[in-house]
Image: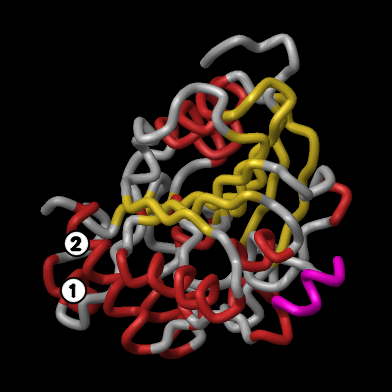
Amino acid sequence: MDIRIYNRSAWDRQVETGNRWTIPVGPEVIAAARRDDWSVILTPTKPVPRSWFPPLAGLDVLCLASGGGQQGPILAAAGARVVAFDNSPRQLAQDRFVAERDGLSIETVEGDMRDLSAFPDGRFDLIFHPCSNGFVPDVRPVWRECFRVLRPGGSVLAGFANPALYVVDDAAATDRGELIVRHVAPYSDLTSLTDDERRRYTDRNEPLCFGHTLDDQIGGQLDAGFVLAGFFEDSDPGHPLAKFLPTFIATRAVKPVSSQGG
């Protein structure tokens, strides 16, 4: 299975079915952002600290795997020059919908988050990368490409799942609220599930997921050359594991000013 092609179609389908991460923000949110009254999220519920952002006016921002008409348009309304990059054409169409509706300038580019060859070295000041790298089987190329396309002193703000979320049986957790430790990290829908279990998702054209280790999520950023400068945890209150530990993580990682390349 070509996971990029499959998940592109699956996320297009999520737009059709109204997944919460595909619903564009309303004009009132954009109007507030233009007044500098805004917030965005990398994880399910907790706003990203405003201290993690430099002044947005004129800032070159890459919203990485972040289509859906949500974060990109807000940052554009707050003054950033936004490029929205996503694997799903329908998700990018949501960004264009908000841009056209509210008079924003947003460039949209379709592609694989592991390959940012569409952009030269040092193209961006900031990368905003909400929970999405769980839809690719290898995350370290994402961090290396982020490092390459950032200018020295730039930062990547990223959200991702705690790998503990994937060691429990998802069907038991979501259907019956039971926490059954079953899987080994790193997790893959392609190899950790039986064929019948995987069809639970593919028959409904739902995205396939991958649970990366902290060694790849955080260690991968450090190995790419970043310096970790911010960290917080969050949870999806609808998941039973959230009663026991935070199920999502957000990081701010900075490319050192002395860096001249990845």
Residues 226 and 183: in front is: 226
Instruction: Kindly identify the residue that appears in the image at 32 percent across and 48 percent down.
Output: 111
Identify the secondary structure beneath mark 1. Answer: helix
Q: Is 203 situated left or right of 97 in this image?
A: left
Which residue occupies the extreme front position in the image? 103
Instruction: Kindly identify the residue that appears in the image at 37 percent across and 38 percent down.
Output: 114
80 is higher (above) or lower (below) than 175: above
Instruction: Kindly identify the residue that appears in the image at 66 percent across and 85 percent down.
Output: 27
Badge 2 crowding class, 10 Å Cα cut-off, few under 14, some 14 to 19, many 20 or more, is some
Disc assigned to residue 202: 1
Q: Is residue 31 magenta?
A: yes
On the question of residue 245 being in view, the answer is no
Closer to viewer: mark 2 or mark 1: 2
Residues 23 and 232: in front is: 23
**Magenta residues, start to end:** 30-37
Q: Main secondary structure of the magenta part?
A: helix
Using the numbered discs, state the Cα–Cα distance from disc 2 to disc 1 in whole angstroms. 9 Å
Q: Is residue 35 magenta?
A: yes
Residues 150 and 204: in front is: 150
Task: Please count the marks in the image.
Answer: 2
156 is higher (above) or lower (below) than 255: below
Q: Quadrant of residue 199?
A: bottom left
**Which residue lies under the disc numbered 2?**
6
Q: Amino acid at mark 2?
A: Tyr
The percent coordinates of residue 100 (x first, y second) are 50, 75
On the question of residue 153 being in view, the answer is yes
Q: Is 217 situated left or right of 141 in this image?
A: right
Identify the secondary structure beneath mark 2. Answer: helix
Asked if the residue at tag 1 contacts the one at tag 2, i.e. Cβ–Cβ closer than 8 Å, the answer is: yes
Q: Amino acid at mark 1?
A: Thr
The percent coordinates of residue 250 (x first, y second) are 68, 51
212 is higher (above) or lower (below) than 67: above
